[in-house]
Amino acid sequence: MAIIKHISIKVSPLALLKYITGETKDEEVKFITGLNCSEEAESAYMEMGLCYQSFANEKFCGKRNDGGKQKIKMHHYIQSFSKGEITPEEAHRIAIKWAETVFGTEHQIVVATHTDKEHIHTHFAVNAYSLNGKHWIDNKATLKMCRDISDKIVREHNLSVIKNPSRNKNNSYGEWLARQNGTSWKAKLCDDIDRLILQDNVKDISDLIRELQNCGYEVTQHKYLSVKPAYLKNRKAVRTLRLGDGYGLEELQYRIENKDMEMPISEVAKYEGVQRDYALCLRSLQIKLYRRETDWHKVTYGELRKNAELLNYVCSNNIHSKDEFENMVNTAAEKADRLAKDIKDIEKKVCILERYDNGCDELIQYKLQLDDLRKKYEKAVSEKKEISGNYKIFVRQLESDYEVILRKAKTELEAYEEELHKPPKREFTDVVRDMSAWAERVIATERKYKKVEAEKNIIQPRKYDRQEGR
């Protein structure tokens, strides 16, 4: 079976390239392929460095001198197979197909298959930026996509995959055994939390804490929520986030506020443009998790919360298309760049005045202006990061992660809107009511006709009858 792992490379991309190409290994690496770059470590490093530096605006090697957060230079993926399951040639073919499917045709990747261990495995050195400037972000969603694509390709080659991958690494063997035997107090705590959240009197975290205490739990809330049964005097309380997905403090609050109710389709129909697409995705994810559909385990409460927050952000900023969102990003970036330029200009003037006329009124004014600009710049940079971060998530989800979900959800929405435009069906009671009204009108018309005939007979004179002489 194939396993995909990921490692972020922030400091020494050249060392990774030398390792996977075999320059620092005893055994020769026979299977090496360069996608959009050279197969040789030094050449690939120079080519990737030129691409990275042109888009990241920083060096491809070394640490930052300002002590700031280190950026990811390269993504190191590893695809491993079970012992004796595959030949090196086939593993390398699968690896190249996987890399091209995941990253497309614009990324620089060195693919190297190693045979120095009992299990055959392939290393992938992926530049953080593609040739067209697209930044690859590794997170749970992209790693899941990588593994899903790997499983699909492996199945096509009639090889095995992991059917039920483990999701929670927090439980020890003792806890696992207790759960199997039905004696785990943590499992009971999860059941109690699930039950209490759905009660009408639980409207926030403080209500949940009160109800847990009424059930015999000791609860403390600081940065995290920690709980344990009161009778376990010598046991340490467990942080609820360790219980699994949906039990962290933010996830619990989200669950309480939503009470396991997905967004109705009628609410989705109120949105327009790209807001509607995002609302459809959110509703589909809620249905998967709340109704425990076949692939519900692929959705987390944390993901739902983040999607709801992003939908609110898109709506509050009146964004209806990808272009509008992109313009917002560009505007924020231009504002930050303009302020940075203004700061540099003022700093030059301050530097000149400090050298030739230190203490003048003009210098004081420039320094006050500089302080004000720096505050505005910090705020602008913060806004730029927020907008850019939301935009990246937004685009990635709509263009990759949620493509299938959105296609299915749109079908449901179209059926709903079509139903809205249909004339309402007449109920049986409406038909009876209409028949009764029709019958009353017929009877009224007949009465009116008889009344008119009777009046004619009274008013008109009788005709002369010759036989009777009348």
Image (cartoon, helix red, strand yellow):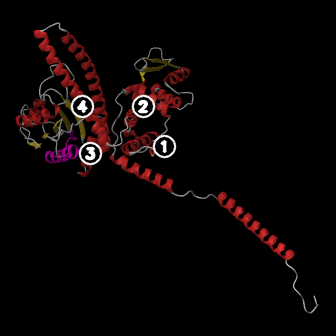
State how far apart marks 1 and 2 are (Cα). Answer: 22 Å
**Is residue 444 shown above or below 8?**
below
Q: Are marks 1 and 4 in contact (CB under 8 Å)?
A: no
Tell which circle, 1 or 2, labels the residue nearer the N-terminal end: 2
For badge 4, the amino acid type reads Ala
- Give the mark toward the camera: 4 or 2: 4
- Give the mark toward the camera: 1 or 4: 4
Q: Which mark is residue 264?
A: 1
For badge 2, the amino acid type reads Gly
The residue indicated by pointer 2 is: 246
Q: Is residue 91 magenta?
A: yes
Residue 371 in percent (x, y) is at 25, 15
Q: Residue at x 10, y 31 (%)?
A: 14
Tell which circle, 1 or 4, labels the residue nearer the N-terminal end: 1
For badge 1, the amino acid type reads Pro
Main SS of the magenta part reads: helix
Q: Residue at x 50, y 53 (%)?
A: 420
Q: Element at badge 2?
A: loop
Name the foreground residue: 364 vs 147: 364
Span shown in magenta = 79-104
The residue indicated by pointer 4 is: 333
Q: Element at badge 3?
A: helix
Which class describes the residues within 10 Å of circle 4: few (<14), some (14-19), or many (20+)? some
Quarter of the view holding residue 355: top left
